[in-house]
Image (cartoon, rainbow, N blue to C red):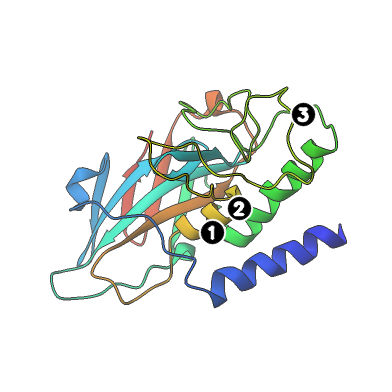
Amino acid sequence: MRYLVFLAFALAAQAQGSPGAEGTQPKASAAEYPVQAVSGNLAIGAEYMVHSFGSGEQMYLAENYLVVEVALFPPKGQSVTADAARFALRVNGKKTLLYAQSPALVASHLNQREWETTRGAEADLGVGGVNIGLGHPQERDPVTGVPRGRRLPDPPHAPDASVLGGGEARQRERPEELLIRTALPEDPHRPAVSGFLYFPYQGKPSGLKSIELLFQDAVMKLK
């Protein structure tokens, strides 16, 4: 427990005190996202990711969270300050709303699951590998992507990613670092900003009949 508390504080400091919280790369406009809305002078794009988050070829799962990528587009020549606390989810039409959680807190939960797994836990993983489809993890190591049963170094540090196209191998980013880096950043210095939001949910995806993303006066039907 002390380790997890320390880890949460450390990740929070990393997210606030370093340029690591970059968000994702916004698309050209809100119209390129599956769901769009307008609130005031902001155009908003959103995509429901079920439990998955990532960047490029690296994709992982946050098992106990519903993940939504959002993008904010202010008028030309203006900036926008993103604030995750202004977003909420309404699930199955319930009055009780789900609010976005701190990336550091979500990342610390990923670490807890990994730590338990390295000690031989048999529970389902909270973090998965690439090509995860609708949120079901592959039978691979949650950090390295190596198929299960293959011997890994101890402690399990993330190795270089596989070489693509004969080029030099790149260092594979740890899931918790990637989660913090791609979370929606509170940054007012960009013309547009996008990133992932994490809403706590421990039910089964099959029980989700409707999901609405709320932002100020905008209501976006994700499912």
The quadrant in which the N terminus is found is bottom right
> Label 1 amino acid?
Ile
* Mark 3–mark 2 distance (CA, rounded to whole Å): 19 Å
Residue 180 numbered tag: 1
- Identity of the residue furthest to the left in this view: 76
Would you say the residues marked 3 and 1 are in contact, meaning their CB atoms lie under 8 Å apart?
A: no
- Residue toward you, 204 or 122: 122
Q: In which quarter of the image is residue 81?
A: bottom left
State the residue at coordinates (75%, 48%). 112
> Label 2 amino acid?
Glu
Is there any visible trace of residue 97 in the rendered image? no
Q: Which comes sooner in the sequence, label 3 or label 1?
A: 3
* Mark 3–mark 1 distance (CA, rounded to whole Å): 24 Å
- Return the residue at label 3: 123
The quadrant in which the C terminus is found is top left
> Label 3 amino acid?
Ala
Q: Give left or right: position of 223 versus 183.
A: left
State the residue at coordinates (78%, 66%). 6
Residue 176 numbered tag: 2
Is the residue 120 above or below the residue 217 in the image? above
State the residue at coordinates (39%, 53%). 214
Q: Kindly state the secondary structure of the residue where label 1 is placed.
A: helix
Is the residue 207 above or below the residue 45 in the image? above
- Residue toward you, 162 or 118: 162
Is the residue 30 above or below the residue 222 in the image? below
Q: Determine crowd level at label 3: few under 14, some 14-19, many 20+ residues with C-alpha closer than 10 A.
A: few
Q: Kindly state the secondary structure of the residue where label 3 is placed.
A: loop
Q: In which quarter of the image is residue 15?
A: bottom right
Would you say the residues marked 1 and 2 are in contact, meaning their CB atoms lie under 8 Å apart?
A: yes
* x and y percentages locating residue 140 in the rendered image: 63, 27
